C-alpha cells in the first residue's frame, strides 16, 4: 500500500509517489548498463516555462549551467532538448532474441535501454523538482494508476494534471511570442532571451492541494 500526493517546490507542483524510491514497476525496469534509475528513461525537453523558472528562481542558473554543459543538450530556438544514453547494441540483441518482456500496453521497448542524463542511479534526479519538466513532475506509471483505490480521487488527479499541462503549453507559446516580438530566441541571443524571461517571471498557476490518493488496498500488491 502507498499513495500518490501533491507537493510544491517553490510553488512548482509535482505529483509524488511513495513507491518510486523502491520501484518495482515494469516502466522502471532497466536492461541497459545503468540500473536503478526508476522510470527516468525519458530524454527531457525543457520548455520556455521551465527555462523561465531557471532564469528566475533560486538555484536555477546552476541547473541551467548543468543542462547546457551536458554535451547531449541541443539548444533550439525555444526549448532545450537533452538526449541521454541509449544502449543500441543491447536493444538490438534483445529485439532479435524474440524473448520480449510482457509489457501489457507498453509498445516501445527502447525504454528499457534508455537513461536520462540527469539521473543518478539509486539517488534520483540531479535537478530540483522546480526545474524538471512537466512530464517528469507528473508522470505516474500505469501500474500505480491502475491500483488507485478511489476512482473519483484519481479522476481529480488526472483532470488537474491535464489542466496544468495545457497551461504550460499555452504559457510557453505566449513566452515564445513575446520573445519573437523582441527579436530574441535561445540560439541567436541566449543571454538576452534568458534575461528577458527572468524579468517577465510571475508564478501564475494555482495548482490545487489534492488529498493523497491511496493505492494497493484492494490488491495488497503495493
Ligand atoms: S512512477 Fe512507477 S515506474 Fe516510475 S519510479 Fe514510480 S513506481 Fe517506478
Ligand atoms: S530530468 Fe530528472 S526526473 Fe526527469 S527524467 Fe531526467 S532524471 Fe528523471
Image (cartoon, helix red, strand yellow):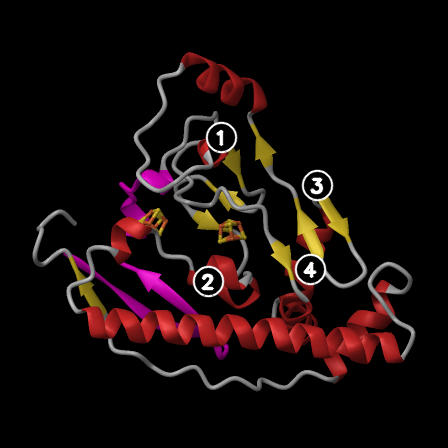
Q: Position of residue 107 (x, y in %)?
A: 43, 37
Q: Are marks 2 and 4 in contact (CB under 8 Å)?
A: no
Q: Which residue is located at x 14 percent, y 55 percent? A: 216
Q: Quadrant of the N terminus?
A: bottom left
| Sequence-wise first label, 3 or 4 | 4
Cβ at disc 4 under 8 Å from ligand 2: no
Is residue 164 on the magenta stretch?
no
Which quadrant would residue 185 be assigned to in this image? Answer: bottom right
The location of residue 178, given as percent across then percent down, is 80, 80
Asked if the beta carbon under badge 2 is closer than 8 A to the nearest atom of ligand 2, the reply is yes
Give the mark toward the camera: 1 or 3: 1
**In the rendered view, does 110 fall on the left or right side of 74?**
left
Packing grade of label 2 (10 A; few <14, some 14-19, many >=20) is: some
Tag on residue 64? 4
Task: Judge the density around disc 3: few (<14), some (14-19), many (≥20) Cα neighbours within 10 Å.
Answer: some
Compute the Cα span from label 2 to label 4: 17 Å
Q: In the image shown, does 56 or 90 lie closer to the viewer?
A: 90
Q: Position of residue 164 (x, y in %)?
A: 49, 75
How busy is the neighbourhood of tag 1: few (under 14 within 10 Å), some, or many (20 plus)? Answer: many
Amino acid at each position: 500500500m502507498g499513495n500518490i500526493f501533491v507537493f510544491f517546490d517553490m510553488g512548482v507542483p509535482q505529483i509524488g509517489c511513495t513507491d518510486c524510491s523502491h520501484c518495482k514497476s515494469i516502466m522502471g525496469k532497466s536492461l541497459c548498463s545503468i540500473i536503478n534509475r526508476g522510470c527516468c528513461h525519458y530524454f527531457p525537453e525543457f520548455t520556455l516555462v521551465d527555462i523561465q523558472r531557471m532564469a528566475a528562481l533560486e538555484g536555477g542558473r546552476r541547473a541551467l549551467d548543468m543542462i547546457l554543459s551536458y554535451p547531449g543538450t541541443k539548444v533550439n530556438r525555444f526549448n532545450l532538448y537533452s538526449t541521454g544514453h541509449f544502449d543500441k547494441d543491447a536493444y538490438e540483441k534483445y529485439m532479435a532474441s524474440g524473448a520480449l518482456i510482457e509489457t501489457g500496453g507498453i509498445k516501445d521497448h527502447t525504454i528499457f535501454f534508455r537513461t536520462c542524463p540527469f539521473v543518478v542511479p539509486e539517488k534520483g534526479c540531479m535537478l530540483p523538482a522546480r526545474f524538471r519538466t512537466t512530464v517528469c513532475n507528473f508522470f505516474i506509471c500505469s501500474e500505480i494508476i491502475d491500483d488507485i483505490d478511489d476512482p473519483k480521487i484519481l479522476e481529480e488527479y488526472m483532470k488537474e494534471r491535464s489542466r496544468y499541462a495545457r497551461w504550460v503549453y499555452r504559457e510557453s507559446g505566449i513566452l515564445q511570442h513575446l520573445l519573437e516580438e523582441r527579436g530574441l530566441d535561445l540560439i541567436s541571443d541566449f543571454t538576452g532571451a534568458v534575461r528577458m524571461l527572468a524579468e517577465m517571471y510571475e508564478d501564475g498557476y494555482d495548482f490545487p492541494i489534492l488529498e493523497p490518493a491511496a493505492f494497493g488496498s484492494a490488491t495488497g500488491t503495493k
